[in-house]
Every structure is written in C-alpha cells, then in structure tokens.
Amino acid sequence: MHFHQPHNRKSYSGKKSRVIFYLLGIFVVAALFYYLSFPSGSYAFVVKKTWEVRNSFFANLIAVSSSILVGQKKLAIENQNLKKEIIDLKKSEIKAGNLEKENERLRKFFGLKAKGALVVASVLSKPPFALPDTLVLDSITGQPLSNGDLVFDSSGVLMGEIVLTNDAYSVAKLFSSAGNINEGALASGEHISLEGRGGGGFFFEVPKGFYINKGEIIYIDGSPVAKVSEVITKKNDPFIDVYLESLISPQSVSMVGIMRR
C-alpha cells in the first residue's frame, strides 16, 4: 500500500508561493501606475516647473506676436497718413500753380502791368447752392477786397461786384440779380438802363425807331456783360422791350478775377 500525502503538501506549498508572487507583482504595478498618474514629491515639482515654463513660453510668444501685429498696423496707418499728406501737398501746389497761371492770363487779358491790380479767387459756392445770382468766393490772403470791386470770369466777362467781404470769404452779387439796375452801353456808344431779371437775365427798353439787333453785346464800364436774346415790338406801345442773357453762366465758373475800383 502506497501513500502520496507528503507530495501533495509540497505541491500545495508551491502553488501558494506563486499566488503570493502574482499578487505582489500586481500590487507593485498598481502602485507604480498610481505614482505615475498622481505625481508627488520631486517628480511633481519637475512636472509643475515644466508646465510653468511651457505656459510662460507660449505667453511670451503670444505677447511678442501681438506686439509685432500692432506695430505693423500702426506703421501701415502712418504710411497711409503720410501718403495722404503728400497727395494733399501736391494738390495744393498744383492749385497754387493753376491760380498763378490764371492770374497772369487775366492780367495779360486786361493789359494790366501793375501786379496788384487784379487778384484771383476760387468760387466756394454758386447757384443753385448759393443765393440766386450770387457767388461766394474764397478769402484772399494778403489781398483785402472792398465792396464795389469788380468780378470777372476768366474770359474777361464782367459778372458783378463785391458786396460783402471778411477774413473767411467774400460775396459777389451778379449784375443779373433781380431789380439790380446799372448803366450799360451798346457797341455804338448809346447808353441804356440795364435791369437784372434774375437767373442770368437782363432787360431794358428803348423808344421805337431805335435800331438794335438780336445778339448785340451790352457793356458795363467798358466790359462785356450780356447779349440781346429777344427784341419785342408791340403795336400800341411806344417802346421796344429788349431781353438779354448773361455771356457766362455762373454754374460754369470755378475761378474769378477781381479788379479793385
């Protein structure tokens, strides 16, 4: 008869040892995993510092990038402003050159040798953006105007006279203003009483038998002002009605010459 009881006790002891080893291994792995997942001590300090350095780097990078973008935008705005100033300066130079040329042309037209006898002004406002038969003129630095100074267009047509002047602007009233009466003359030398009708129109009357043609030019102070547009003769009226229109439309005028009386 055979007994195997001691052999079974040995086998059981070996199995128990392996189980304990496996459990210990599991415990070690779990502890290691826990340690890595939730850093503490020196490891946590290193991780924390690394994270702070990373955040600081990206914050500085964003700040530098923003500064560069703001600087570029500011530089672009400054460049645009500089370009605008240069363009405005060139426009001013061109305008000044054109005014001087126009001034010289007007002086030559009138045969004026005295440099200060005639000045040029820009038209700031005109009908329909100003009062009827009125021009608002730019102020003339160093060239003070007076009421009664005569206003011409660039072709030499007499348009009106200065009625108001100050440091900011001057106002010229056209001879065609309604109710404005001036002494005029025909090319033949005959004098007439020329009345403004408004809107660039004029009117006068002469006795029957007075010879006058359509298209004839009327003068004020020896300068051309208007031309005859219509001559009306009525059967029982001893006078002839003569209607005229200005030689220049105020809407087409951008600069004028002003002659001091």
Image (spheres, rainbow, N blue to C red):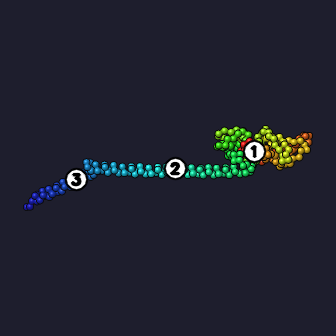
Neighbour tally class for label 2: few under 14, some 14-19, many 20 plus, Cα within 10 Å: few
Which label sits in the foreground, 1 or 3? 1
Mark nearest the camera among 2 and 1 is 1
User: Which residue position holds label 2?
Assistant: 78
Q: Amino acid at mark 2?
A: Glu
Closest to the observer, 132 or 108 = 108
Query: In the rendered image, is residue 245 in sight?
Result: no
Q: In the drawing, does residue 124 fall left or right of residue 201?
A: left
Other residues around mark 3 within 10 Å, as few (<14) / some (14–19) / many (≥20): few
Where disc 2 sits, the SS reads helix
Q: Is residue 37 left or right of residue 127?
A: left
Which residue is depicted at the point 79% across and 47% down?
224
- Residue 19, horizontal then vertical, whole percent: 19, 55
Please identify the quadrant where the N terminus is shown: bottom left
> Spatial distance from mark 1 to mark 3, Cα to Cα?
111 Å
Q: Which residue is mark 3?
A: 28
Residue ID for mark 1: 159
Q: Earlier in the sequence, mark 2 or mark 1?
A: 2
User: Which SS class for mark 1?
Assistant: strand
Rendered residue at 63%/52% (across/down) = 94
Residue at point 48% right, 52% down?
72
Point out the residue furthest to the left here.
Answer: 1
Q: Quadrant of the C terminus?
A: top right
Q: CA distance from mark 2 to mark 1?
A: 46 Å
Q: Is residue 18 above or below residue 196?
A: below
Q: Amino acid at mark 1?
A: Met
How far across and how far down the image is residue 12, in percent?
A: 15, 56
